[in-house]
Image (spheres, rainbow, N blue to C red):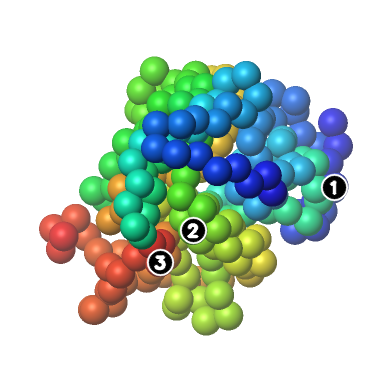
């Protein structure tokens, strides 16, 4: 991983199209601004990893039992 | 074309059934082509998303409206642009199901649905920003359904 030091308001450019800027600095956290092509998604890493873990669990799933009824809440129950 | 699958054996697929997932499903970057195989059984809300590129890879999907009738998806721009959707209503929204050892614990990921533009045959797993959407939403409801999120802020 490339590690760079930036001050507030300084930026990093990745490739030609992605910019990462230090918008604000606090003692425990940093506010980061991201500018990227519209079709790229940007996510907090822990969310991304949680989704990936669920996908892996899903891939290992068994088929749903044929006779298992879905005891669904009717809309009125909501 | 003929495809080989571990769950369904070999079968023939029309090129027009193939859906392109340019970003793949999160965690599975090598598969870019999938087909949707409806689960057998009349009125089943389930379908399988079977990879054409990797024979062992298949995901069980469910129509989330059947599980949570008020489920509404706000698509981020990255999704509408990459899927060429003008509106989420143009897309087919299905959520990935996990069937653990105890099938009563069956759950689905409402935070990151699979969205498919059936006209363009493009698909993507979209991570939504709404933190109230449960990554592990139990499908078989009983009292005391927890709404605690598995994801973090």
The image shows residue B45 at horizontal and vertical percentages of: 45, 52
Q: Residues within 10 Å of mark 1 (few under 14, many from 20)?
A: some
In the rendered image, which quarter is residue B146 located in? bottom left
Query: Circles 3 and 1: CB distance less than 8 Å?
Result: no
Could you tell me which secondary element the residue under label 1 belongs to? Answer: strand
Foreground disc of the pair 3, 1: 3
Q: Residue A39, image x and y in percent?
A: 52, 25
User: Residue B23: x, y in percent?
Assistant: 63, 36
> Which quadrant: the C terminus of chain A?
bottom left
Q: Nearer the viewer, residue A29 or A27?
A: A27
Report helix, strand or loop for mark 3: loop
Q: Residue at x 31, y 64 (%)?
A: A72
- Which of the two labelled residues, at mark 3 and mark 1, occupies the earlier sequence position? 1
Discs 1 and 2 lie in a common subunit: no
Which x, y percent locates residue B7?
A: 75, 58
Q: Identify the residue at image location x=23%, y=79%.
A: B143
Query: Is B144 situated above or below A39?
Result: below
Residue A46's mark?
2
Q: CA distance from mark 1 to mark 2?
A: 35 Å
Relative to B39, B147 lies left or right: left
Q: Label 3 vs label 2: CA separation? A: 10 Å
- Mark 3 lies on residue: B150
Crowding near the residue tagged with mark 3, few <14, some 14–19, many ≥20 C-alpha atoms within 10 Å: some
Subunit that carries the residue with mark 1? B
Is A41 in front, or is B90? A41
Query: Mark 3 or 2, which is nearer the eye?
Result: 2
Task: Write down the residue under mark 1.
Answer: B4
Furthest residue in direction left, as rendered: A76
Q: Quadrant of residue B37?
A: top right
Discs 3 and 1 lie in a common subunit: yes
């Amino acid at each position: 991983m490339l590690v760079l030091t930036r001050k507030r308001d300084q930026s990093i450019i990745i490739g030609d199209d992605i910019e990462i800027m230090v918008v604000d600095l606090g003692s425990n956290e940093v506010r980061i601004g991201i500018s990227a092509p519209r079709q790229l998604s940007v996510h907090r890493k822990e969310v991304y990893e949680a989704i990936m873990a669920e996908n892996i669990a899903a891939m290992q799933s068994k088929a749903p039992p044929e006779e298992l009824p879905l005891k669904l809440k009717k809309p009125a129950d909501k | 074309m003929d495809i080989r699958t571990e769950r369904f054996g070999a079968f023939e697929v029309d090129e027009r059934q193939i859906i392109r997932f340019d970003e793949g499903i999160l965690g599975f970057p090598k598969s870019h082509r999938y087909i949707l195989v409806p689960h057998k059984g009349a009125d089943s809300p389930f379908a399988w998303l079977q990879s054409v590129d990797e024979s062992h890879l298949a995901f069980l999907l469910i129509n989330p409206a059947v599980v949570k009738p008020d489920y509404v998806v706000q698509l981020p721009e990255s999704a509408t642009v990459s899927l060429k959707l003008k509106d989420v209503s143009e897309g087919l929204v299905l959520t990935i199901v996990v069937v653990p050892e105890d099938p009563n614990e069956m759950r689905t990921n409402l935070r990151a649905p699979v969205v498919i533009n059936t006209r363009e045959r493009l698909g993507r797993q979209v991570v939504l920003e709404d933190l109230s959407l449960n990554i592990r939403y139990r499908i078989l409801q009983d009292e005391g359904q927890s709404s605690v999120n598995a994801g973090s802020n």
